[in-house]
Amino acid sequence: MTATRVLVINSGSSSVKYQLLDMRDHSRLAVGLVERIGERSSRLRHTPGRGGEVRERTGPIADHASALKSVAEELAADGLGLDSPELAAIGHRVVHGGKRFTEPTVIDEPVLKEIERLIPVAPLHNPANLTGIRTALALRPDLPQVAVFDTAFHTTMPEAAARYAIDVETADAHRVRRYGFHGTSHAYVSRETAKLLGRAPQEVNVIVLHLGNGASASAVRGGRCVDTSMGLTPLEGLVMGTRSGDVDPAVVFHLKRVGGMSADEIDVLLNTRSGLVGLCGDNDMREIRRRIDEGDERAQLAFDVYIHRLKKYIGAYYAVLGRVDAVVFTAGVGENAAPVREAALAGLEGLGLEVDPALNTARADGPRVISPEGARVVVAVVPTDEELEIATQTYALVGGGSA
């Protein structure tokens, strides 16, 4: 029997998301989420694929080890246990791979140590990723387990894009450079966009706009990332749900010296109390648009700042690429918020960028073109699928082919 299943695990600080995929047809055999790990109100929500009923468990789940054991029990109840000979590998999302990890990597002890060494540049993410990996290794030590890194797709950036203009020795000593994130999404969406255009990825230049609660842009030339908006951390770049995106670095010094804030307080401010929520108190674009329709000025300001920053990056990456074949929107906001897509491209008709109002507002599933027929640059919506990308990369690495 050929093993064709891949379990994808995304382990966060207090949650574990998972999907079990069959790589023969990319079908979901199970999807689930364990949340509020370590609290009395922990919850596991498990959905079997192919029409199964959702199951929930509530009650204390002490740690990630307990969470993954519960996941294994739910999978076993569907005849999809971790001991199945049809399970080919487990693929793990790892947020930060630094400069070393440029592609998916089979996990061994040296790999684990390097991921651990990168914790100072990803203190919120890599520790949780490591916990999930070590727990899964304990459950199936004999099974190939693969790390797929958020940063890997962006390691093709030239030094001119990856370097900050600070003292080189200081930067190198502390690994300070632009790494970029959401790489699995940008890789998947740029490749799917080329497919939508009926061309090979090597033939097209694409600006990818991943707009969710976290948001990032990338410039992809011939299938390779040449620039991206996130930097050393996921804080840089676009305005996000709770993150500020670009700010003058001296804001930090000002808040410390004049505002009397500590480094930790400023960190919390810029990462959790800024962006849309900092501007208007909401980070849900649907709620912001509802408030705008009611004449709310703060909601309007938040939307305008969000769009202004987005439009700046579109223009900048147009200049970086020189020739653009497509601008593509993805993730929760990008896929569902027609007003964001319309506003982001308004006034850019001279660059060949515009949306067809009817196509832009029509409800539709799957990849679709929303620019007018004959437009110089295609504007598209392409739903992202980071779990499928992780599974595909994992399966290819362990000998399953390209799936």
Image (spheres, helix red, strand yellow):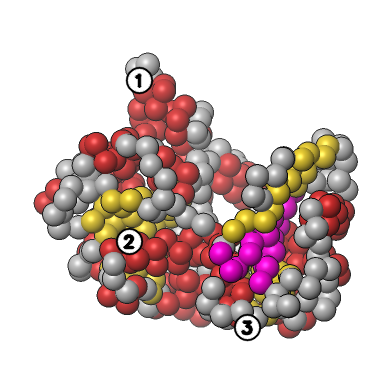
Relative to the observer, which residue lies in front, 114 or 89? 89
Name the residue located 27 percent from the left edge and 47 percent from the top edge: 370
The CA span between labels 3 and 2 is 28 Å
Quick check: 158 left or right of 123? left
Task: Determine which of the numbered discs, if any, sits on residue 379 in the image.
Answer: none
- Residue type highlighted by circle 2: Leu
- Is 137 one of the magenta-colored residues? no
Assess whether mark 1 and mark 2 are in contact (beta carbons under 8 angstroms): no
Q: Which secondary structure, mark 3?
A: loop
CA gap, disc 3 and disc 1: 53 Å
Quadrant of residue 75 within the rendered picture = bottom right
* Residue highlighted by disc 3: 399
Quadrant into which the C terminus falls? bottom right
| Residue 271: image location, x then y, percent | 56, 46
Determine whether 3 is above or below 211 in the image.
below
Q: Is residue 313 left or right of residue 104?
A: left
Residue at image point 88% right, 48% down: 62
Foreground label between 2 and 1: 2
The kind of secondary structure the magenta stretch mainly shows is: strand
Circle 1 sits on which residue? Answer: 293
> Left or right of 263: which side holds 135?
right
**Number of labelled discs?**
3
Residue 78 percent location from the top left of the image:
79, 53
**In the image, which is nearer the foreground, mark 3 or mark 1?**
3
Magenta region: which residues? 4-25
Residue type (three-letter) at the residue carrying disc 1: Asp
